[in-house]
Image: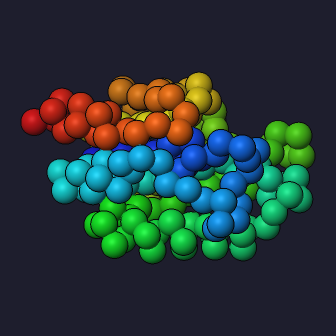
Amino acid sequence: MNKAIYIDRDGVVNSDEGHYYVYKTEDFVFNTDIEEALALLKKHGFLLILITNQGGVAKGEYSEDDVKSVHQHMQKHLKQHQADFDAIYYCPHHDAVSTCHCRKPKPGMILQARKDHDIDIKKSFLIGDSQRDIDAGIAAGIETCYKVPKNTSILSIAQQIINKKQ
């Protein structure tokens, strides 16, 4: 079985300052040290799984193609640093429009990734910037979930995870 780090996107990987939705590549600004943090986690054998709510799709603010374009842009940059995600899961739904099993705080994306990638949830962690991220992790059975301040470096969290697992 694999061990994984489940990571929220907006506010954790990239800054969402000044934007309610980040769906254009020109608005996608990486947070400080993200490349180093993700590369460190990969180097220590963790799968990197992105889990992100993208409710603007359901609201008609942007399209799934916009989401995919931003993710391609993100992955291209991160790959240059050996820090790209092993899998990306996004929820295009929004409670104001329809219900689903994947929108955080529901654990659907985490559970699907666990199944798809043979992940041992007990050896895995979650990093998010909102309570709904943490609640999704807990609902999926992740024992250690880190809630970080929005738009800050997660390098110290990555180091804590590495130290915890050695």
Q: Can residue 2 be seen in this view?
A: no
Residue 128 position in % (x across, y down): 50, 36
Residue 30 position in % (x across, y down): 49, 54
Task: Determine the residue positioned at 89% across, 46% down.
Answer: 97
Is residue 166 positioned above or below 6 on the image?
above
Is residue 51 positioned above or below 161 on the image?
below
Name the residue nearer the viewer: 165 or 15.
15
Is residue 75 positioned above or below 133 on the image?
below
Instruction: Report which quarter residue 42 is drawn in.
Output: bottom left
Residue 103 position in % (x across, y down): 68, 43
Name the residue nearer the viewer: 65 or 111.
65
Residue 95 position in % (x across, y down): 82, 39
Task: Determine the residue positioned at 59% across, 29% down.
Answer: 130
Q: Can residue 88 be seen in this view?
A: yes
Left or right of 45, for residue 133: right
Task: Determine the residue positioned at 70% across, 65% down.
Answer: 24
Q: How many discs appear?
A: 0
Left or right of 98, for residue 143: left
Name the residue nearer the viewer: 81 or 54.
81
Q: Quadrant of the C terminus?
A: top left
Task: Determine the residue positioned at 66% across, 60% down.
Answer: 27
